[in-house]
Amino acid sequence: MKILRIIPVLLSLVLILSCGQPQTPALQQGTLLPQAKVIGDFSLVDQNDQPFTRERLKNHWTFAFFGYTHCPDVCPTSLAMLAQMQRRLEKAGTPELPDVIFVSVDPERDTLATLATYVPYFHPDFLGVTGEPDEIHSFTRRLGILYGKAENDSGENYLVDHSASVLLFDPDGNMRAVFGPPHDPEKMANDFIAIRNYYEESQ
Amino acid sequence: MKSFILATILLLSVSLAVAAETQTLVSDAWVREAPPGASMLAGYLTIENPFDEDQVLVDVSSPRFAHVMMHRSEMVDGMARMIHEESITIPAHGKTELKPGSYHLMMPAPDLRLTTGDTVPFVLRFANGEQLEVSAEVRKP
Ligand SMILES: [Cu+2]
C-alpha cells in the first residue's frame, strides 16, 4: 500500500529529470539572472595596452570585479578571494578555467603600468582593465555597477565608493550571474561549476 | 593580629600586581602585504579594554609612514566605501577589532616596498593619555 503511494511521486520525479529543460541550479552565493543580459559593445583597454572589447569576453567564462588600486582594504580582500576561488578550481582540475578581470573605477589614477603589476600579484592570470572615463562609466552602468568619488574628499587622495559585487559573463559575452558581498571562495567556485553545467545542458 | 596584617599585606600586594597588569592590550597587529604599485597600505590589530570606562583611540603614528589614518570600510546596499574616523572607541571591558572590511589603519606605501616578514612599529595614543607601542608584522592574509 505504501509503495503504491510512492509511485506517483517517483513517476513525477522521473518526468522532471527526463524533461528537456534543465533545472535552474540552486546557488550558494550568487544570483543567476533569469535571462542572460546582453551588454552591447564597449571599448576598454587591458593592462598590456591591448583593446578590451566585447569580443574578449567570448568563448570563455569571465569573472569581473570593479575597484581601484588606491583601495587597500576591500579591493585586495576581494582579489585575494577570487584568487582563492581560482586555485580551488585549478586544484579540482576544472577544465577551461574562467578568466578574472579587475576593472578600474578610477581611470584617472590607475595607469596601465600600475594595473600590470597590481592585478597579477593576486594571480598571474588575472587581468587589469581600464579605459577612458566615459567608456568605463557607460560599461559599468549597463552592468548595474555604481561608483563615484566619496563626498568631502578633494585633492589627489580621494576615495572612491564602488559596488562590491562580482559579475559572471558566459562564453557568449553576456552577463549571467551576480555575486553580492561578502564572498566565500568555495561557494563561488561551486556556483561557477553549477552555472556552467546548467549553461552547457541548456545549449 | 599579626597574621591578619600579613594577610592584608598579601592581599594588597596581589591586588597591586593585578592592577599593574591591567592595561590596554593590543594583539594580532599586522600590515597587509600590498602588490607592487599599490599606493596605500592597510594595517589591522585588536584592542582589548580592561577598564571600566570606554577607551578612545585618538591617534596612530609610525616612523615608517608619512601619516596613519583611521578608517572604516562599510558595505551599504552592495556598495563598498571607506570612511575617515577621527577616533575609534573600545568599549569598557570589551574589544574592538581592526580587520579587513571593517576598521583599519590606512597609510601611504613607503618608497621601499614592505614585504612579508618585515615589521612595522606603530604608536597608539588614547584619549586618557595612555600610549602604546606595537610592532606589526607584514603578511599576506
Ligand atoms: Cu581605508
Image: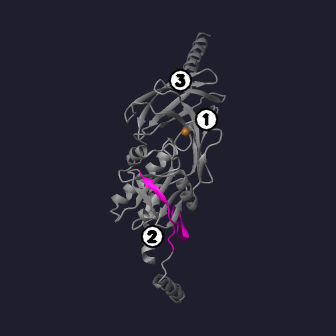
Residue picked out by circle 2: A172
Whether B46 is among the magenta residues is no
Image quadrant for the N terminus of chain B?
top right
Q: Are marks 1 and 3 on the same chain?
A: yes
Residue B94, numbered label:
1
Please tell me which residue lies in front, A113 or B75: A113
Q: Amino acid at mark 1?
A: Gly
Residue picked out by circle 3: B132
Left or right of B58? Residue A36 is: left
Residue B82 in picture, x, y percent from top left: 59, 42
Identify the image quadrant of residue A158.
top right
Establish if A103 lies above or below B97. below
Q: CA distance from mark 2 to mark 1?
A: 52 Å
Please tell me which residue lies in front, A58 or A181: A58
Q: Tell me the mark number nearer the camera, choosing from 2 and 1.
A: 2
Please tell me which residue lies in front, A16 or B21: A16
Left or right of A57? Residue B19 is: right
Residue at x-position 34% and y-position 58%: A91
Residue A80 in picture, x, y percent from top left: 43, 48
Residue A158, numbered label:
none
Q: Tell me the mark number nearer the camera, choosing from 3 and 2.
A: 2
Magenta part of the protein: which range? A24-46
State the SS at label 1.
loop
Q: Amino acid at mark 3?
A: Leu
Establish if A198 lies above or below B137. below
Image quadrant for the C terminus of chain B?
top left
Q: Chain of mark 2?
A: A
Q: Tell me the mark number nearer the camera, choosing from 1 and 3.
A: 3
Q: Chain of mark 3?
A: B
Q: CA distance from mark 3 to mark 2?
A: 57 Å
Q: Chain of mark 1?
A: B
